[in-house]
Amino acid sequence: MPMTFTVDPRSGVPIYLQLIEQVKRAVALGALISGEQLPTVKQLALDLTINPNTVARAYRELEREAVIDTAPGRGSFIRTDGAGNQTGHAAADVVRDVVDKTVREAKSLGAQRALLTEIFQGALDRWFPEAQ
Amino acid sequence: MSTVSIAHLRKTYGQFVAVDDLSLDIPSGCVFGLLGPNGSGKTTTFKCALGLARRDAGDIRYDNVSLVPQTFERIAYVPEKSVLFEGITVAEHMELTRRSFARFDVKRCAELLAGFGIDPRKRVRVLSKGMKTATAVALAFARTPDIMILDEPTSGLDPINQRVVLNLIVEASANGTTVVFSSHQIGQVERAAERIAIIDRGTLILEGAVDDLKARRKIVEGVVDEHFSVDGFAGDARVAYVEHNGRIIRLHAISNADDLAAELSARGAIGVRVLDLGLEDIFFQSVSTAASRPEA
Amino acid sequence: MYYFEWLRVRRVFIVVGIVLAVLLALNVWARIRVNETGMNTNWSTNIPLSERATQTEHKLANGINETIIDDPSNGLHAVIDTNPSDWSRSIDVTGPKNVIAQSEVLHPQESIIAIHVVSQSTNGATQHVVVTQRIETPIEYLFVATMLFALITATIFGTAFGIQNSGHLEIAFTVPARREETALRLIGMDLLGILGTDALVIIAAVLAVATWTFPHLAWTSQSLLMIGVALLGPIAWYAMLLVATASLRRGFGVAVGLAWPVAIFVLVMAHVNLGTSNLAQSIQTIFGAINVLNPLEHMNLGRTDNGIVDTTGYGASIVWLCGLAIAYLALAIAQWRRVEA
């Protein structure tokens, strides 16, 4: 299995969410490509020494979100249909979470909407200079 | 199917109430972690569940059937303290176990012992505390039971062998075994357990899936001015308790932390953030909550 | 669980075996010493002979070994026929009276090798003696030794439940068997240990006898009953110890150790003459009543009534020992099944 995962069980973030996030990120970054097989629930549970039902929950969630396909008896695979879209979709999920958290924290620190717009514009200009 | 169900268990030793109205439902194939301070009633609960101690009240069921001798073919118990016979060898314990349980796999036991680096020819007397624990664990897992009750199954073991034991639990669970275990090492429970219960002074304080608890239990923190009133949050069902030190307010949320954060912001708090809690934090939060209101 | 008990039994067998082997070795040594110091079974040499004496040996047609001794210096003529099948001897000694009087053959001592004089007659100058080495050992004698050994092993096994209680019930009570069943298996193993000790001691005793003479074990009408008492006594003693320790988690060793002085004290107080005062009489009555439950009371293998062996009591003893053993075992099991880990 080329892909390795790591989880931090001590973190306050539920382990199954950590796994989902890592799979999505790997798909978004192309580290996992369509059709690629994920470890079995048992294998991943043993590799990470985490509860198998937790792994199964993450896989169920990923299947529900159409990131992977699970064929009984064969294993779980990254979905093949519309792989490009899928990757974009997974990336959007990750980005949305990060931005949402950032905005919430900024707001709680008393930042105004105008300031945030200005900051985001600046960041976009720096990382996407060709759009100017 | 291998469920364990404890209903309204009560056990007293003279005046001392060791377990009081404790109910736990452990689903089939679940790894269930039982947490609690020393003397909170974990071991007593296990002993009552196994009929080793007589309960004053309550009901214990395995797959919805009361405990009968034949149930023990399917249940393996690793007690907290070594119960091995000091004067005989590890191999003789294997033979003893083989004669008691039809499902005992001698070859598997030998492999497990080798994995722990235990020489079966040694007498139990010369083994360290950790090696005694490991021997008991190997004897239990070699029986491939449907239900395992493990009381501190990693005590005295080095980190490597602790991980071996945890992986045995994970593997057994993947194969459908129901595992109930207690540990003072919360990090291990966090890894291996799907569900946990925290008990303190014999009563159940908190029970649920580890990931759900982590998703729900948060600290919502914000900075407020001197005139801020906590009254609105103090009685809120979503809040376990409120810490209010000077200008910092911390809401210990049981659920809906994001809503609470939004409300706290709306009421004028700045720097509001939601802090994730590890199981250890949740443990201390629960136990100290229970301790702070002993008459409740 | 019973396997652990078997390991205990095996260890006890080994120790008993070693002790018996040492005792047998001492016995053999004693036997050899006796031979060297002249307690002789070769009777012909006990007849005082001069240097001119001649001795000829030949086999008769019927398989008898005949030894003929002539001593012309004192006119002695002896014919000794030895039957090799049972070592019995027919001895004819002819000669002057003073010579015959000196020959020990006519005055064989009773001894542990017990040369038995079957008949003795005088015909003129010829003394005719028939002796046999056949001695009969009353079989119950062997069982006295057996009972002593078995009582010791019974005392060791009496801690069976106590050992389980001292931190091993988590093993004993989490097996797929009813607790009564586990208890019975454990007890069964201990009984095997006690009866096995009996067997080992009997074998050793027979071997010990055999070093001196061919063991002819004699049965009397009472033998079977006495053997019964010897075998049942330690079992009843074991059962009593189990009752005393069935619910003890610690101190069971002390309890078993104290059982001996207590039981002996009760036995003595029940039988010794305490006097005729009312107090003494009532104390004696109380101890008499308690003593009925004391297995030692029913293990008397030397019942005598004014010097005459009392043969009526063994049957009653057996009934008592059986009853006590069963009652004590039942009580012990009833207690043990309720012990909490």
Image (spheres, rainbow, N blue to C red):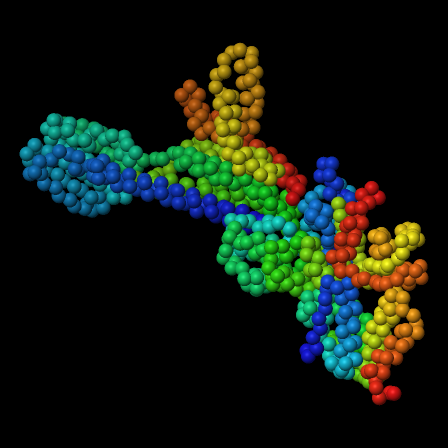
Identified at 49% across, 27% down, the residue is: C264
Q: Is residue A82 left or right of residue B175?
A: right
> Which is nearer the eye, C268 or A125?
A125
> Which is nearer the eye, B83 or A120?
A120
Is residue A4 placed above or below B15 in the rendered structure?
A: below
Q: Report x, y in % for residue C165.
A: 60, 42
> Which is nearer the eye, A97 or A80?
A97
Return the residue found at the far front: B226
Is residue B97 placed above or below A78 in the rendered structure?
A: above
Would residue B16 be seen by someone viewing this image from the given angle? yes
The image quarter containing residue B32 is bottom right
Identified at 62% across, 63% down, the residue is: B164
Q: Report x, y in % for residue C41.
A: 23, 38
Q: Report x, y in % for residue B266.
A: 93, 61
The image quarter containing residue A34 is bottom right
Q: Report x, y in % for residue A4.
A: 69, 75
Identified at 52% across, 24% down, the residue is: C266
Would residue A65 be seen by someone viewing this image from the given angle? no
Is residue C24 placed above or below B65 in the rendered structure?
A: above
Identified at 27% across, 34% down, the residue is: C115
Q: Is residue C279 left or right of residue B294?
A: left
- In the rendered image, the quadrant that contains the C terminus of chain C is top right
The image quarter containing residue C221 is top left
Q: Is residue B295 left or right of residue C197?
A: right
